Image (spheres, grey):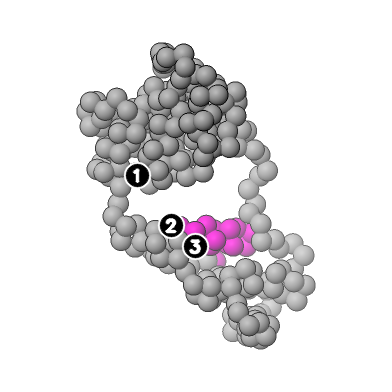
Amino acid sequence: MLLQSGRFFSSNDSDSDSSDSNSIEEQLVPSSSVDNHPIVPVLIPREQTDPKVVQEQSTSFDFDLSSPAFSSFLKNPSKFVSNVPKLKSDGSNFTHWSKGLDTVFMYIFNKVLFTDDPNNFEIFPQAKGALRFFIQQTISPDLSEMIQNEVSPKRAFIEIQNNFKKSTRLTQLDLVIELFDMFNSIKSLKPNNVFSRLFTLFDKFRRVGIPLSTEWGSLIVQVFAPIPSGMTRYSWFHSISVELDRLDKIGPRDVQ
């Protein structure tokens, strides 16, 4: 990619995120700090635990019902509570909370963006009790009354979502502000993380219905591109643009 060629990038630069290579299993180690929570018994009909039956009901998942993570969650969902930021009583961190749920459920159910579709809470009948308990444990005690009459984890999540999820436009505005804040702190950003953060932000824009065109994306990436020592911003932009002008169509990855 252009910015990583020998013409513009030093040998110490990289476009990959500097995060470690630990697997999700290593990152989501069940915490013993909440082991004092009671283990939740899940009493369900035997036919609902038959792997063949459940597998037919969950064809949208590439999932192993015998996975250790799934078994551990069913036995004691409290072990995973510390991996999710507790939802505040005013719901101001709803997005952060739901992202925390997504991270944990990706590990347990091998399902990306689990909370985007509340129906996912009912894919596995034998997990409903654990999921309902888990939601209860990851919200402020002040919010318990809100879902006290909701036995279904799906309905409990929807009730919380209806109360606290931001409107689409407000979410879009938050993303624009995030982009501006990122630009204002550009000097403090590590070069290795710039591209990773930008493409993550582009994906967020896409998910809220305002995907950036390839042209806009390429211009934004170019603005954020770390300037090599010894070059001015103008000369840096000029050097990149001369190369990019030779392409028929320019996208963010071309600039990267």
170 with respect to 199 (left or right)? left
Q: Type of residue at label 2?
A: Arg
Residue 96 in sight:
no
User: Marks 1/3: CA distance?
Assistant: 21 Å
Q: Quadrant of residue 62?
A: top right
Residue nearest the observer in this picture, 244 or 120? 120
The residue to which callout 1 is attached is 93
State which region is magenta.
187-204
Lower sequence index among marks 1 and 3:
1
> Is the C terminus in the top left, top right, bottom left or bottom right quadrant?
bottom right
Residue 175 lies left or right of residue 6; in this view the side is left
Q: Does the magenta portion include 67?
A: no
Q: Nearer the viewer, mark 1 or mark 2?
A: 2
In x, y percent, where is residue 222?
57, 74
Which residue is tagged 3? 202
Does label 1 or label 2 sit earlier along the sequence? 1
Point 60% across, 29% down: residue: 64
